[in-house]
Image: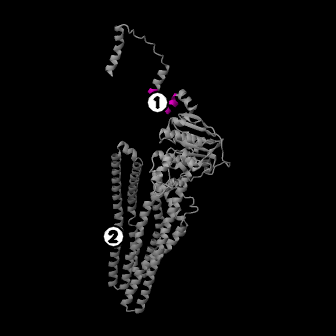
Amino acid sequence: MQIQDLPYSDPGVPDARSGPRLLWWLGRNQLGGQCRALLWGMLHFASVCALPFCVGLAVQAAVDRSPRRLALTGGLMLLCGTAIAVGDTFLHRAAVTNWITAAARLQQLLARKAAYLGSALTRRVAAGEVVTVSTGDVEKLGWFVEAVSRFTAAALTVVVVCVALLVYQPALGVVVAVGLPMVALAVLPLLPRATSRADVQREKAGRATELASDTVAGLRVLRGIGGEDLFLDRYRRASQEVRHAAVRSARMWSVISALEVLLPGLLLIVVVLRGVQLAREGRITVGELITVYSAVMIVNYPLRHFQEIAMAYSFSRPSAQRAARVLSLERLTDVEGSRATELPGGDLFDPATGLRVPAHGFTAVVCGDPDMAGRLADRLGGHAPEPGLSVLLGGVPLDELSLDQARTAVLVQDKDPVLLSGTLRELLDVPASGTVRAEDALAAAQCADVLDALVQGSLDVSDPMDARITERGRSLSGGQRQRLALARSLVADPEVLVLDEPTSAVDSHTEARIADGLRRLRSGRTTVVLTSSPLLLDRADEVVFLHEGEVVATGRHRELIGTEPRYRAVVTRETEDEQREAAAMETAAPPPPQERPDLSEGAPLLGALEPLEEIEESA
């Protein structure tokens, strides 16, 4: 797989049982790229380590005054230099390819999983964790995948050098063959502590990131209540904890790095002392001593990859665990569906609550609990099926339909819909029936002022459809974002449209016009609105009141206001004391008529005015 061939037509089915299994699966699926990187790495490292032998041969040729061997050695050095350049170039190319293709494969798998789970993903995994996995974690996993081949090439090169030194000069080769493995493995006892400190640092950094994202998301609210300083102090403390954890982690890695320099240096000193002793005894030549010395010095280069693979694994292991946790999530129902049928139509029925939504009507649902309303909306749409009874559409369980059929039949607009960045034309370019024009949907959602704001905020744009919307629509107000999301849902024109509080952020005048436009544009289609707004409830064909998860009343809005106290309390926001007072006033007997004072007599008139004077004084 080459970079220009991305994305993958099929990224495969990952082994998400654990983090190490996911890493092994990623490496196994890039076996061709790993083998290429291994071969080029072997060429590069072997050529680097062959230079000392060339230098030793050249010195010995000069000592023996042999021009022919000196010229031959010079040719070998030229060949080694060329092999070093070629090997390094193609090793880097293969390593970067492995890195990018592994990260791209993982990003495709995460995107496919997000589309597969839908809105259930962020209820089972924190949104911040999903973002972390799809950005920083994929880079760490790609780093480990590409580092494995370079580490393998370095390890094989070290083995080859040890064997070559044993054959070339056994007396010094034994010292090198024993010392190099000890140098390479000396840092292993320190790796668990370094890994644990790195995990602590990442955990604290994740908490600080979540705190920062929550602060930015709620900045308007914080400014309204004067809480910026409080959250700023919290973030300052969290960032200081991250700094201290990073310093502790860096100290351990600095110790490991120091050992990677100190231990090879000590080995080099031992080799030189032993070599000088052997040279004095005449057991080795000067060229052989220089060859062994240079080989030990050069072999430090491939030894550095031992530290790199340790760091790559310590950083990628928790990333792989997080990625495996996300990729292992499954829907509670089969995405392909267990029933082969055409797109159903008819009444929408929820056995869990007893809610029945008549087909081709405008039905409003009132829930005393907002969380229950959100769960009901998800269940009606089949996006996040729960264990138990399935919602029926025309008698067909939504859980038995394929995911595509369920989403085509029923569209759910969340309470907090998200606007993607891009032009307004791209925002409204959604799978649709083609019956509802974008202009009609925008008009029904009362988006005239939104279009003006988009044009004013864009440069050299006269057509509002070409105006750009910033990320998540942050340049717009909450009501403007809500109306654009409603227009997008109206353009889709599904058979059943479920709206959860679609007008909670708009004023009453705009809300009334939206209710009229929604009723007019959705004529002949099934529309369910979960709301407690009297303006929307008054325009519904039928209002269903749910209390404690069950349907307790059905009728028109004005009928329920007069006959169902619990419904009136939810819609009018009456307190229990206000309800008791209203009930007492309705049941209380009318006061007896008071006799009018006789104005012809002074004393009765004064007696009638005394209570008025007392009231005035008390006021």
Left or right side of 437 for 285: left
Q: Is residue 475 magenta?
A: no
Q: Between residue 497 and residue 52, name the one nearer to us.
A: 497
Image colouring:
one colour
Q: Is residue 586 above or below residue 365?
A: above
**Residue 588 drawn above or below residue 510:** above
**Mark 2: which secondary structure?**
helix
Q: What secondary structure is the stretch in magenta mostly built from?
A: helix
Mark drawn on residue 574: 1
Tell me which amino acid carries mark 1: Glu
Between residues 431 and 57, which one lies in front from this camera angle?
Answer: 431
Instruction: Work out which quarter of the rendered image holds the C terminus and state it.
Output: top left
Image x and y of residue 429, in percent: 56, 53
User: Residue extending furthest top?
Assistant: 601
Q: Residue at x 34, y 64 (%)?
A: 254
Query: Quadrant of the image for the N terminus?
Result: bottom right
Rendered location of residue 203, percent (x, y): 40, 53
State the image coordinates of residue 231 (x, y, percent, origin top left): 35, 47
Residue 129 seen in render: no
Q: Amino acid at mark 2?
A: Leu
Name the residue nearer the viewer: 104 or 301. Answer: 104
Q: Are marks 2 and 1 in contact (CB under 8 Å)?
A: no
Q: Which residues are magenta?
A: 565-578
Q: Which numbered disc, 2 or 1, marks the residue that appears first in the sequence?
A: 2
Q: Residue furthest right?
A: 341
Instruction: Reply yes or no: does residue 568 show up in magenta.
Output: yes
Determine the CA span between mark 2 and mark 1: 77 Å
The location of residue 12, given as percent across then percent down, is: 57, 60
Q: Nearer the viewer, mark 2 or mark 1?
A: 1
Tell me if mark 2 has few (under 14), some (14-19) or many (20+) residues whose alpha carbon lies within 10 angstroms of its own: few
Which residue was labeled with disc 2?
A: 262
